[in-house]
């Protein structure tokens, strides 16, 4: 029987919470993660209608893209929708889990789904994340080098792009003297010892530090393990915001806008384009609010940048660089529900996963 924490742990192994933005509030927001799952309802926003739907369909876990709780709730009196949702969920033993900007930042996340809809090829993250990598340096006796190296790699260290087991070692000598209460692996207590060792270096993502350290301490033969951990400014190309890729065939601007509207099922597309003769081949995109990525899209010579919630003065910043289009917040993220189903179904095949029928765009359009 699956527990809520099984789903939570799986999603967070794919989209670690440490990736979320400082303003975000992803994670398990309501509920007991030890409860057995009945059914799962997936949505963009956990509204009152969604909770009512979960009750009617016998679902005790709601997985949403947007958190229902953004700031701290100081009272639960039912005076606004967030409070009412939380109260009703608790009353009916329904857990609510949110996976927001951390899901935006993974390689196969929200923006990958967006890029799939536009049939983009050769996709890569538009703005890779900085500060997500660290380096472990440790000092290992020669006979134990391969055992320690293997343990660190199995724990998730040493992956660079399409390569794994990436490490570096250099030979040297370590010196130490065991004190009164020591139990040295080599050498004699109270005597200075000089041991042939290798300096072993390996990169790892920050969210795996606990796992990496456990692997090191278990595999290393020394009673007291010497190691250093360095934070790195390297860009991690597996995580970041936005995506950029190429259309199979370049399109005229008007044809691309029609294609965009059709593929994303938009009622309208707001755009600015100073060069209507431009052909669209290289496309950058960001689900949700993505104006902050405009300079990156320009720098990477995108012909078009697609996002949502662009303000009047912001849209002018595209100048003559590219086609800058706003398809709407809901429209840019609505296929996240499909993504949730795919990510969970990859591992769990014996659980009922339902699309919310209350997952509707809160913004309405009047088209005469």
Image (cartoon, rainbow, N blue to C red):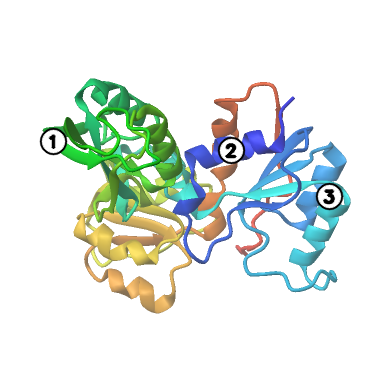
Q: From where the camera sits, is residue 266 visible? A: no
**Disc 2 on helix, strand or loop?**
helix
Tell me which residue sits at (47%, 52%) in the image: 18
Q: Quadrant of the C terminus?
A: bottom right
Look at the picture and state if 117 lies above or below 66: above
The residue singled out by tag 3 in the image is 52
Residue 351 locus on image (x, y percent): 70, 26
In this rendering, the answer to whether 21 lies above or below 354 is: below
Earlier in the chain: of badge 2 and badge 1, it is 2
Could you say which disc has been placed on residue 9 in the image?
2
Residue closest to the eye, 227 or 283? 227
Q: Earlier in the sequence, mark 2 or mark 3?
A: 2
> What label does residue 332 carry, if any?
none
Element marked by disc 1: strand
Viewport quadrant of the N terminus: top right
- Nearer the observer, disc 3 or disc 1? 1
List x then y, in percent, for residue 153.
Answer: 33, 29
Badge 1: residue crowd in 10 Å (few <14, some 14–19, many ≥20): some
Query: Could you tell me residue 14's position as x and y percent?
Result: 48, 38
Give the left or right position of residue 328, taking residue 141 as reference. Answer: right
Label 2 or label 1, whichever lies nearer to me, is: 1
């Amino acid at each position: 029987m699956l527990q809520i924490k099984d789903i939570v742990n799986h999603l967070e192994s794919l989209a670690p919470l440490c990736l979320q933005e400082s303003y975000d509030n992803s994670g398990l927001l309501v509920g007991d993660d030890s409860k057995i799952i009945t059914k799962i309802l997936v949505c963009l926003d956990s509204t009152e209608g969604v909770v009512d739907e979960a009750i009617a369909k016998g679902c005790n876990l709601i997985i949403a893209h947007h958190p229902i709780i953004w700031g701290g709730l100081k009272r639960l009196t039912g005076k606004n929708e967030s409070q009412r949702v939380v109260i009703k969920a608790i009353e009916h033993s329904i857990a609510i889990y949110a996976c927001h900007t951390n899901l935006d930042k993974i390689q196969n996340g929200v923006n990958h789904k967006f890029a799939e809809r536009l049939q983009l090829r050769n996709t890569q993250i538009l703005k890779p994340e900085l500060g997500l990598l660290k380096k472990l340096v440790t000092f290992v006796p020669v006979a134990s080098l391969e055992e320690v190296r293997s343990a660190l790699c199995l724990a998730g260290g040493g992956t660079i792009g399409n390569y794994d087991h990436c490490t570096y070692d250099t030979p040297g000598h370590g010196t130490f003297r065991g004190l009164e209460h020591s139990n040295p692996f080599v050498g004699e207590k109270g005597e200075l010892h000089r041991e042939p060792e290798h300096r072993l270096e390996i990169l790892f993502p920050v969210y795996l530090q606990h796992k990496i350290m456990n692997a090191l301490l278990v595999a290393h033969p020394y009673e007291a393990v010497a190691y250093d951990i360095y934070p790195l400014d390297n860009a991690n190309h597996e995580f970041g915001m936005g995506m950029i890729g190429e259309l199979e065939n370049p399109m005229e601007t008007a044809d691309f806008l029609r294609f965009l509207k059709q593929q994303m099922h938009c009622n309208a597309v707001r755009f600015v384009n100073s060069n209507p003769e431009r052909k669209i081949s290289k496309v950058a995109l960001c689900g949700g609010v993505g104006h902050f990525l405009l300079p990156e899209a320009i720098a990477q010579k995108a012909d078009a940048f697609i996002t949502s919630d662009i303000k009047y003065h912001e849209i002018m910043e595209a100048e003559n660089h590219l086609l800058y289009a706003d398809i709407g917040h809901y429209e840019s993220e609505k296929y996240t529900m499909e993504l949730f189903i795919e990510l969970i179904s990859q591992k769990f095949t014996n659980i009922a996963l339902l699309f919310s029928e209350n997952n509707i765009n809160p913004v309405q359009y009047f088209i005469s």
